[in-house]
Image: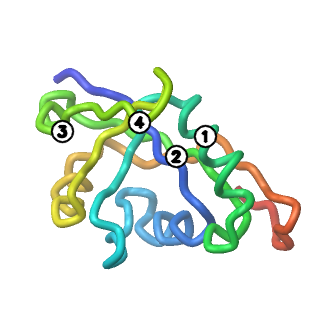
Amino acid sequence: METRILYRPVGLFELQLIRASDYVRFPPRLPEQPFFYPVLSFEYAEQIARDWNTRDEKSGYIGAVTRFKMPSGYLEQFPEQVVGGLIHRELWIPAEELDSFNRQIIGIIEIVAAYYGEQFDGEREW
């Protein structure tokens, strides 16, 4: 089976929910979030985590990059979206399909980088 590595930049609260799942699933989307957006490169995920999440109160002033593996065949149903420069490639997974998406994750969701904003005042445990 061919696989593909995806990345997801997350803030503190989403990271806590991933940890609560034993690192095997992403949490449901909020009502105002119609899509789940995994990205296709570490560089893009790092840019979001470092430059956006660390300045965002709703992210707890933390940006983390998660990495996970998926079957390539499953992902073919979601066309790649380019939302800026060449590195800004992502998939748009409808929120109602996130449970199915989570069941396709191979192994665990890893934390591969963490960034902390100036306003972060907690423990740097990630």
Mark 4 or mark 1, whichever is nearer to me:
4
Q: Secondary structure at mark 1?
A: strand
- The amino acid pointed to by label 1 is Val
Q: Residues within 10 Å of mark 1 (few under 14, many from 20)?
A: some
How far apart are labels 1 and 3 at the CA level?
A: 24 Å
Q: Residues within 10 Å of mark 3 (few under 14, many from 20)?
A: few
First along the sequence among labels 4 and 3: 3
First along the sequence among labels 1 and 2: 2
29 on left or right of 8: left
First along the sequence among labels 2 and 3: 2
How far apart are labels 4 and 1 at the CA level?
A: 23 Å
Q: Residues within 10 Å of mark 4 (few under 14, many from 20)?
A: few
- Depth check, front residue: 20 or 49: 49
Instruction: Determine which residue is flagged by label 2.
Output: 66
Q: Quadrant of residue 73?
A: top left
- The amino acid pointed to by label 4 is Val
Q: Secondary structure at mark 4?
A: loop
Residue 63 in the image: state x and y as whole percent: 66, 54
- The amino acid pointed to by label 2 is Thr
For the residues labelled 4 and 3, say whether their Cβ atoms are less than 8 Å apart. Answer: no
Instruction: Determine which residue is flagged by label 3.
Output: 78
Instruction: Determine which residue is flagged by label 4.
Output: 83
For the residues labelled 1 and 2, say whether their Cβ atoms are less than 8 Å apart. Answer: yes
Give residue 17's mark. none
